[in-house]
Image (cartoon, rainbow, N blue to C red):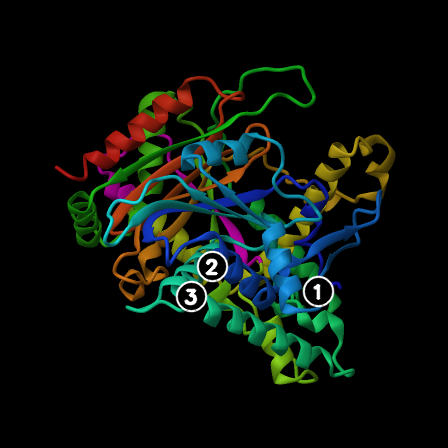
């Protein structure tokens, strides 16, 4: 069943390339975390968030009409069986599983948009209260939802399975699954309900629409003018290849800082009136200048994502029952905008001075009255590009190019971003560690994307009281300069500790 509104954020499903993974490594008793309990929880959440259990329906060669299609389970037992079909129990370490997800055969497809892996990779640590090491990997296509959706789901998992001193029993979990399924069954029995209202609407359908054709044209012109004003040309050198589909191997390098080190870095940022996110932009800039020998005549540009959830109203519909509203008001939808940060390509006397430049640009992007109109235009542009990539993947570019109007997406400026920064912020504000069973301890978190050839993305976040920095990039596309640069980024952050 198609979602309500604009489909522009769905069209990337044609190439089936944007996949995202999240992994939590933790310790827990086997009585709290085991395959059956995880399967029951997964079944509950796949009913509560229907997009997780949906598939993509697309007509071959038609890149403009792409739909989510959801078939609700006919019984609780079918819901559990469906959960098992998208759940795998493994025994490898997280590093092996992550590498397999990033570089192995595709885990996700148009017919399977989400997938769960539970790895039982350790032996019980005690006879009296046996704790075991687990890794939980939640895999989802990027067009299904953003990072906030993934982390909220992970916290919901731990809250459901391990809340309080006495976690919910297996039989109580199954009764909760029955209750979730009955809510769907009771709601869908209302023949007046329009099917599309079951799935959460797209971001574009939630945004204010132009009041007139003139306003729509004016917003497009303003958007492209704003894009042309952003200049940058500092990029990592690519290793040349004549292969139209070159080999790709994504690796993830991760560095963490302990609690004491993180507290010192936070204290420096607070004193300078910036955040760690602002500082990371500035440090990436400083590290590139130190190792990259950039052209000082042109600035350096990076891009980042902006969480738009605080800017949009909740999903409601006056012509639907309250039960259906609860089904369609899932947090699983894509709600991100994109903005650029441009910094000088000459070394600053103070990295914090440059961090304050970043802060001003971030504030300008998030507080702009044109944020939502620019977001709509950006979504349309990304939709057109996604259709183009889909044609390339399907070897139909020459035949179908005349069906895609890309004239309006061409910028007059020749700009290129060095890299993308995904700043997830303080994830301890999402993961309610203190509410979990005392024996359930979250240790590490890894987040990343299965990328196209040439992908390069930096992540920064705090988790379990520690600052984490990671970079995922295609090692086949770049020379050793990326690793040299990353070493300098880590060194720059280490300088904040002394």
Marks 3 and 2, how far apart at CA: 10 Å
Observer-nearest residue: 473 or 112? Answer: 112
| Residue of label 2 | 37
Observer-nearest residue: 193 or 96? Answer: 96
Q: Quadrant of residue 45?
A: bottom right
Observer-nearest residue: 183 or 452? Answer: 183
- Outermost residue to the front: 127
x, y (%) of residue 134? 38, 46
Q: Quadrant of residue 19?
A: top right
Quarter holding the N terminus is: bottom right
x, y (%) of residue 117? 50, 45
* Circles 3 and 2: CB atoms closer than 8 Å: no
Label 1, secondary structure: give it.
loop
| Residue of label 1 | 3
| Residue of label 3 | 160
Residue pictured at 75% horizontal, 42% vertical: 407
Q: Residues within 10 Å of mark 3 (few under 14, many from 20)?
A: some
Label 2, secondary structure: give it.
helix
Q: Is residue 203 left or right of residue 90?
A: right
Q: Is residue 189 left or right of residue 373?
A: right
Residue pictured at 57% horizontal, 25% vertical: 248
Label 3, secondary structure: give it.
helix
Of callouts 3 and 1, the N-terminal one: 1
């Amino acid at each position: 069943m198609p979602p309500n509104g604009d489909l522009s954020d769905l069209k990337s499903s044609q190439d089936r390339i944007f996949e995202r993974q999240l992994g939590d490594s933790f310790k827990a008793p086997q009585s709290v975390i085991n395959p059956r309990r995880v399967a029951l929880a997964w079944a509950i959440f796949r009913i509560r968030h229907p997009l997780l259990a949906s598939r993509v329906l697309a007509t071959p060669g038609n890149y403009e009409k792409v739909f989510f299609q959801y078939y609700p389970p006919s019984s609780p037992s079918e819901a559990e069986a469906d959960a098992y079909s998208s759940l795998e129990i493994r025994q490898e370490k997280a590093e092996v599983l992550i590498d397999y997800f990033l570089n192995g055969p595709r885990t996700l497809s148009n017919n399977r948009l989400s997938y769960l892996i539970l790895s039982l990779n350790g032996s019980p640590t005690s006879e009296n209260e046996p704790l075991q090491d687990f890794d939980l990997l939640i895999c989802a296509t990027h067009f299904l939802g953003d990072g906030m959706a993934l982390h909220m789901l992970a916290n919901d998992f731990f809250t459901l399975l391990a809340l309080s001193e006495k976690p919910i029993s297996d039989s109580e979990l199954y009764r909760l699954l029955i209750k979730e399924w009955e809510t769907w069954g009771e709601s869908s029995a209302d023949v007046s309900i329009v099917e599309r209202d079951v799935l959460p609407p797209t971001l574009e359908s939630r945004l204010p629409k132009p009041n007139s054709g003139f306003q729509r044209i004016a917003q497009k012109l303003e958007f492209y003018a704003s894009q042309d004003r952003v200049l940058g040309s500092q990029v990592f050198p690519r290793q040349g290849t004549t292969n139209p589909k070159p080999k790709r191997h994504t690796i993830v390098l991760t560095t963490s800082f302990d609690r004491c080190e993180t507290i010192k870095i936070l204290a420096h940022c607070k004193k300078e009136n910036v955040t760690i996110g602002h500082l990371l932009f500035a440090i990436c800039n400083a590290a590139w200048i130190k190792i990259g020998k950039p052209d000082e005549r042109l600035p350096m540009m990076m891009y980042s994502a902006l969480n738009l959830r605080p800017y949009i109203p909740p999903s409601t519909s006056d012509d639907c029952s309250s039960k259906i509203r609860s089904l369609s008001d899932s947090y699983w939808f894509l709600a991100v905008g994109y903005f650029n940060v441009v910094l000088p390509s000459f070394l600053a006397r103070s990295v914090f001075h440059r961090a304050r430049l970043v802060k001003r640009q971030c504030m300008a992007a998030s507080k702009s009255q044109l944020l939502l109109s620019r977001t709509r235009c950006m979504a349309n542009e990304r939709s057109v590009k996604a259709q183009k990539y889909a044609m390339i993947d399907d070897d139909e570019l020459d035949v179908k190019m005349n069906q895609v109007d890309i004239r309006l997406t061409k910028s007059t400026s020749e700009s290129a971003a060095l890299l993308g920064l995904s700043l997830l912020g303080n994830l301890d504000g999402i993961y309610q560690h203190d509410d979990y069973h005392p024996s359930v301890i979250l240790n590490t978190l890894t987040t990343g994307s299965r990328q196209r050839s040439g992908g390069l993305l930096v992540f920064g976040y705090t988790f379990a009281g520690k600052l984490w920095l990671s970079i995922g990039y295609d090692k086949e596309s770049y020379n050793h300069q990326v690793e040299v640069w990353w070493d300098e980024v880590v060194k720059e952050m280490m300088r904040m500790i002394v």
